[in-house]
Amino acid sequence: MSVTAPRPGTVTSAIPARLDRLPWSRWHWTIVIGLGTVWILDGLEVTVVGNIAGRLSEPGSGLPISSGQVTGIAAALYVAGACSGALFWGRLTDRYGRKNLFMITLAVYLAATALTAVSFSTWWFFLFRFLTGFGIGGEYAAINSAIDELIPAYYRGRVDLVINGSFWLGAVGGSLLSVVALNTDILPKDLGWRLTFALGAVLALVILLVRRHVPESPRWLLIHGREQEAERVVTSIEQKIEAERGEPLPRAKSEITIRQRESVGFGEIARTVFSDYRKRAVLGFSLFIGQAFLYNAITFGFGAILTKFFDVPTGDTGYYFTVIAIGNFFGPLLLGKLFDTVGRRVMISSTYLLSGLLLFGTAWLFDRGSLSAGTLTACWCAVLFFASAGASSAYLTVSEIFPMETRAMSIAFFYALGTAAGGISGPLLFADLTNTGRVGDTVLAFQVGASLMCAAGVVAALLAVRAERRSLEDIAKPLTATAAQAQATP
């Protein structure tokens, strides 16, 4: 029996160690599919909007909106919704559990996306872009918390990176879907873009049905006084894996003693993150600002660059973005294992620095007029191969370097703060710069993004935590564990 209660309110358990010592199994694939596939929807959303901007601004689209409003205002509202949603849902995730919230936030996303599809006015489109982001923002906190708490320590880095990188599978789908949606020989101007949003809602419904079978985090249950439920969940997982392997699992080698609490106050969370873990807070903020500015700015502006500078037809931009999206996905896929073997510090800093330096090189070539639509796409593939792994590692970092009780709120805060700084200002600035049609303005946007990525890489080289293959409780001891041990000391 792994759970004992030496005195009321205090529990000693091997549940975290039991989860970390599990071998990879079909059950873990169920978690990856049930939780990770939502990033595909996010990628679909962001890419579709970027690629259909030109079509939405054309007469007959059904909306009185300009391309700049789509790539600027609507994009910024989507990100603003994601930031506010992350903070709102993140706090509730730490208080009421991972499963409750990742079901609710997906439902919010589903409804908002479906209502975007029936937009009849600019204000309606803006409103439901905001609410779609509001649902997605909550997903970041709830999903990354659940993934890290359910995936064994040995695999946590690569799994987290690949799941966050699956955003780009959605981007591939969004790019190809936009090619069909923008083809007026197949669909009318005022119908194609609506069907792309409707498809996102249908996919969300399918994921919602799969997600019902994902359990609550046993770590969260244990801390919140539901140790018997946590025991049942872990025992059920172990039985499934033992049946699959045909042999018993090894005994867990460590236990943790905690004083259970129903909730942790916001003031204690803030004090823990920004006082006790000050350097880690600087690290998280730096990583999020760098990746958010680069990705949000370029994602929403790449189609405009192709059409304005290289005369690529609006309906063909999806092909180019598909190539870039594939490069993005292969970054975390091929480099992910190295984050668990070579280590977090080396890999995080090198992926940020390499992507920044390659972006500077792209800006130089673009300024000289040495690039075509095809070669610019190739340059972006090289930049984003490394940047994608680095960006995914930002989510991994803030989800594992703070105590259990603050995890979802920490993810939400750094996502919201970093994305607000880079993700809201980025699209607005980048839309203004690319819309001028001047090469120098676009080069400046590239250079700003490159500078922030390189700066974040330097911070990671100095401050990144060696979290590879370590349990979450070892990386950052739960607040409840610290309190219990303090009481037990004479």
Image (spheres, rainbow, N blue to C red):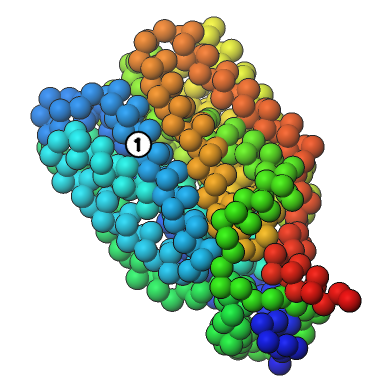
Identify the amino acid type marked 1: Leu
The part of the image, by quadrant, that contains residue 185 is top left
Q: Return the x and y of residue 356 as percentages of the image width and height.
A: 64, 27
Q: Can residue 459 be spotted in the picture?
A: yes
Q: Is residue 313 above or below residue 409?
A: above
Residue designated by label 1: 77
Q: Quadrant of the C terminus?
A: bottom right
Q: Residue furthest bottom?
A: 1
* Residue under the point 27% across and 51% down: 112
From the viewer's perspective, tell me whether residue 181 is left or right of residue 190.
Answer: right
Q: Residue at x 30, y 42 (%)?
A: 129
- Point out the residue furthest to the front here: 490
Rendering coords of residue 407 (x, y %) = 60, 58
Is residue 25 something that shows in the picture? no
Q: Nearer the viewer, residue 27 or 311?
A: 27
User: Where, by quadrant of the figure, is residue 172 drawn?
Assistant: top left
Q: In the structure shown, which secondary structural element does the residue marked by tag 1 occupy?
A: helix
* Residue 1 sits in quarter: bottom right
Q: Does residue 302 appear to the left or right of 473 in the view shown?
A: left
Relative image position of residue 477 (x, y in whole percent): 74, 63
